[in-house]
Image: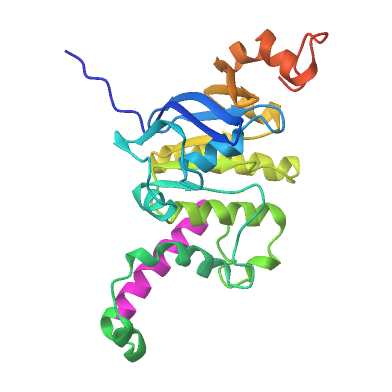
Amino acid sequence: MATTKTPVLRCQHLGIQFGGLKAVDDFNLEIGESELVGLIGPNGAGKTTVFNLITGVYKPTEGSFYLNGVQMNGKKTHQIVHAGIARTFQNIRLFKKMTVIDNVKAAMLQELHYGMPQAVLRTPRFWREEAAITEKAKRLLEVVHLQGKEELEADNLPYGEQRRLEIARALATDMKLLLLDEPAAGMNPTETEELLEIIDYIRDAFKISVLLIEHDMSLVMKICERIQVLDFGTTIAAGTPAEVANSPKVIEAYLGKDNEVVEGI
């Protein structure tokens, strides 16, 4: 008898209420290994709130979510990151005055086991561990096409490269699920195309699942295998890009009742 593989992420009836307002209501989603799912909807639909629930920023007032079958409810953000969920943000959150490589190494501090005496005395153990995370950081920078820029200050990178550095830093946490919040925002078409290539590569090479929020509808339709649509905190459609593109509820949510097609789909 065939067994069903446990999804990387499972959200069951997930929701949160602020006062009398249900910001997210009865949210259900499953994502398998290496799958790329899009989460879309008009401004204020609840997309980023879902990310905040999954990363422990907000505590759900109803429902549960699981990472590889392990319930994550009630865990703090650092515990959820350690379990294998990483995210990028709408607004870039790098250590702007640190070097590119140090930004990546900062996400790997949990891999260092030497204590203060070894650090002060620069013992062989200190140098071994530092060399190991430096080499890992260099490999991740190659993945996001930032090799040769290791010693630049992060603030001096062009906008698109700062976005890719965020992804490298997320990869450094050895995550199983990557949440991308508007990763192509502010990018030109060339930068966006390079980003798509990187996302495809890391899904395949690292077996990472991706949940993507993005306003660029043509991008979402191009790369996502499935799409879920929120409006006023409620799922109004879910399915393949083609199914979602032809959903009357989606068309109405984006453009009103009198329009027949969703621009960019």
157 to 52, vertically: above or below:
below
Name the spot of residue 20 as percent of width and height, x first.
61, 31
Picture quarter containing residue 62? top left
Q: Along the line of sight, which residue is nearer the eye, 7 or 153?
A: 7
Q: Residue at x 46, y 42 (%)?
A: 59
- Judged left or right of residue 70, residue 41 is right
* Majority secondary structure of magenta residues: helix
Residue 88 seen in the current view: yes
Residue shown at the point (76%, 12%) measured from the top left: 261
150 to 178, vertically: above or below:
below
Q: Position of residue 141 (x, y in %)?
A: 51, 58
Q: Which residues are magenta?
A: 126-144
Residue sitting at x 75%, y 46%: 186
Q: Position of residue 169 (x, y in %)?
A: 50, 57
Q: Is residue 28 left or right of residue 187?
A: left
Indicate left or right for 165 with 262 as reference.
left
Between 161 and 73, the one nearer to me in the picture: 73
**Frontmost residue, 188 versus 114:** 114
Q: Is residue 132 magenta?
A: yes
Check the image and name the residue furthest to the front: 20
Magenta span includes 5: no
Which is more toward the observer, 146 or 242?
A: 242
Q: Quadrant of the C terminus?
A: top right
